[in-house]
Amino acid sequence: MVSLSDYLILSSIIFCIGLAGIFINRTNIITLLMCVELILVAVNTNFIAFSHFLGNEAGQIFVFFILTVAAAEVAIGLAILTLLFRVRGSIDVDVTNSLKG
Amino acid sequence: MNNMYTFDTSTLWVALPEIFLLSAIVVVLLLDLFLTKPFKQVTYYLTQLSLLITAILAFNLIGEPKTIIFGGSFILDNMASIFKVFMAGSTMVALVYTRHYLTEHKLFRGEYFVLVLLSMLGMMVMVSGYSLLTLYLGLEILSLSLYTLIAIARERSGAIEAALKYFVLGAIASGLLLYGMSMIYGISGSINVADIATFAANATLASREMLILNFGLVFLVIGIAFKLGAVPFHMWVPDVYQGAPTSVTMFLSTVPKIAALAMLVRILVDGMGAMHAYWSDLFMVMALLSIALGSVVALMQTNIKRMLAYSTISHIGFILLGFVTGVVEGYGAAVFYVLVYILMSMAAFGMIILLNKQGFEADKISDFKGLSKHSPWFALLMLAIMLSMAGVPPFIGFYAKLFILQQVISAGFITIAVIAVVFAVISSYYYLQVVKSMYFEDSNNEITITAPMDMKLILSINAVLILVVGLFPDFWMQLSISIF
């Protein structure tokens, strides 16, 4: 029997991988988007596990909304990325450093 | 508990402003498709009209008793209605300035106005959200529209870079906020703010439950601080302010701050009020860091949008200080500060937009050189705005800082008040730098003001209000306290 804490540990590991990926990754912006998705997956795991063990459906409803928003978010993210590629000719993290001071 | 999620159409009037705005967005979006080039202005006027009607609908709901509908996820109270009126009003002002900017930079597109209306809808949902789900959805409607608004200048590589940075950091912040929400949901068993408040106020919580509640709370605070742009979650603010088209910078630096503040009040004050001792410590650190960093780093800026970004960070520090006090008067002072900040920031960005012409961005401090010779009236208004931001009496910015510091001192944090004042004095240097270049330096470039009459008029009223409201601040302060 998988217990609640097993799910929570799994989700926190996924969460940490996502967060670490964002800070360590210095090459590609697509990887950043994937890391953001990992964070959302961790959150969804949390919500569903809690929902199951609490016997309360609100958490599962929440997950539906997170999935929908995540899809919209990625659509906008990739659209911005396409624009960036058009104006800069590259999607490396290094090219996004013209604004500073 | 069984009828918790029932849907009752007789309560729909509570959400009337939102329902109207959503229908108006659909109409504007569809109509814009069929408008040919000479009639594009119709979109602008329709947008203003929708905002006006939304404001009137929200105004009519002021004074209604507190009502919670949709299974406890949507609340109507005075705070929600007053904030909605202010948001709709300031968005209308912002759009007047925006139109001039968009025409001068050939960015005039119908989508711009639809996106502004959509972000307005998101903010209204945030202000009225009373469950974690509605708050999150409102936040995402707002953020997704803002990312797109920044990227609307798609030939400018700076704007695209700003949009991307805002997007990536915003997505991380939403992720952190959601993780905190999942923890709070897991321990309290509900996503409704009212239930969470009952749970958190329960004195017999085991230390294990307290720990998880605290764990979730930290993530919530991070998410909210990010949206407000408080140090150390401020990295996006200067880059986005500088890179985004000025009209978008103006919009995103003003109106969403009300919504972020409302979310803060809903989650932390209404929901986690019992945990004030825990989150106020976090807020104190963030507030001091924001005031210090915002005041010092702004000294070195030559780009006025970037300078105003750091000035925003320091203003946010003052707003957070209001929440450290933990009393209703302190929260009221914070709300008052936000409203004042919006009035000042709107006028400051309006002034930058005023100097824009035919593809020329007046975003350097040096672009203000010699303004007093070419247009003494607008130079005078800019002087008032800058002095008010620095906190010089009798302008309104002084009273905003005064009320916050009064509350901070009466809550017993004298050292913090002293530090805040010292940094406020330091910050007056860079505000005065703008005044100096307007009055004491001559420019080689000709300053021509091509703005239409309506913009000049609204901008003048906006800037004069900074002085006029400063003459009787008590009414607004009482109003800000009364909403809690």
Image (tube, coloured by chain):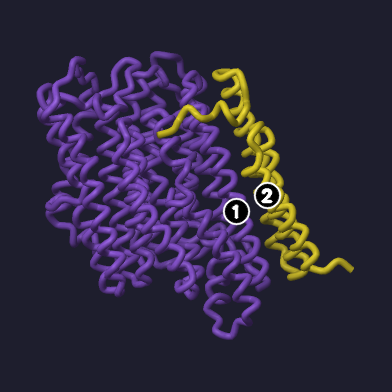
Front-lying residue, B347 or B116: B347
Q: Colour of chain B?
A: purple
Q: To which quarter of the image does residue A61 belong?
A: bottom right
Q: Residue at x 62, y 27 (%)?
A: A92
Q: Residue at x 59, y 64 (%)?
A: B216
Residue B418 locus on image (x, y percent): 25, 63
Secondary element at tag 1: helix
Residues beneath discs 2 and 1 located on the same chain: no
Disc ID at residue A39 = 2
Task: Name the quarter where the N terminus of chain B is drawn.
Answer: bottom right
Q: Residue at x 16, y 52 (%)?
A: B470
Q: To which quarter of the image does residue A77 belong?
A: top right
Front-lying residue, B416 or B479: B416
Is residue B52 shown to the viewer in this render? Answer: no
Which kind of residue does numbered mark 2 sit on?
A: Ile
Q: Are marks 2 and 1 in contact (CB under 8 Å)?
A: yes
- Check the residue under mark 1 and report the chain it is in: B
Which kind of residue does numbered mark 1 sit on?
A: Leu
Distance of mark 2 from mark 1, alpha carbons? 8 Å
Secondary element at tag 2: helix
Residue B296 locus on image (x, y percent): 32, 46
Q: Is residue B389 above or below residue B381?
A: below
Task: Name the quarter where the C terminus of chain B is drawn.
Answer: bottom left
B422 vs B30, left or right, is left
Q: Is residue B405 above or below residue B382?
A: below
Front-lying residue, A41 or B74: A41
Q: Which residue is mark 1?
A: B176
